[in-house]
Image (cartoon, helix red, strand yellow):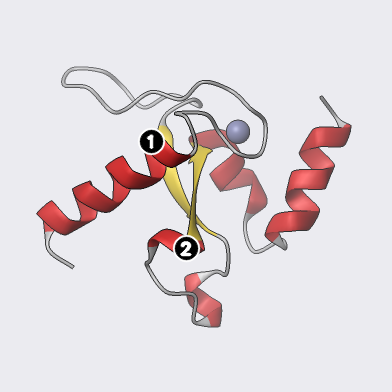
Amino acid sequence: MKPAQRLKLFEDVFARDGGRCVYCGVATHRLAKGQSRSPTLATLDHVVPRSLGGPLSRENLVLACQACNNERGVMDADAFRALKAGSR
Ligand SMILES: [Zn+2]
């Protein structure tokens, strides 16, 4: 995928999910110049992991903060969402 397509995909998912992590609800931010990575950095999370053949498509991506993306690993997306909702 070309960088421009990837950026478009990111913008689409970011807008669709309202700029918030779908798991913990935190308002995420984009990586800005000169800013170091933070736990609330906006990332694209694969619902079906790439390792299991999940495609890089709008339907298979959700907006997640860096912390949740790291924490989820290969856990089922729905199970992880329920886990985060329960600990809120
Ligand atoms: Zn999160």
Q: Specify the label residue 15 is tagged with.
A: 1
Q: Residue at x 67, y 31 (%)?
A: 24
The quarter of the rendered structure image containing the N terminus is: bottom left
Q: Amino acid at mark 2?
A: Glu
Q: Amino acid at mark 1?
A: Ala
Query: Could you tell me how far apart the alpha carbons at marks 2 and 1 are, in whole angstroms?
Result: 14 Å
Q: Residue 78's spot in the image, x, y percent? A: 75, 56
In terms of depth relative to the viewer, which is nearer, 29 or 39? Answer: 29
Residue 52 lies, with reference to residue 87, above or below; the image says below
Q: Residue at x 18, y 17 (%)?
A: 34
Residue underneath mark 2: 59
Q: Quadrant of residue 55?
A: bottom left
Q: Residue 41's spot in the image, x, y percent? A: 42, 29
Question: Which quadrant does ligand 1 occupy?
Answer: top right
Q: Furthest-bottom residue in view?
A: 53
In terms of depth relative to the viewer, which is nearer, 49 or 60? Answer: 60
In terms of depth relative to the viewer, which is nearer, 83 or 39? Answer: 83
The quarter of the rendered structure image containing the C terminus is: top right
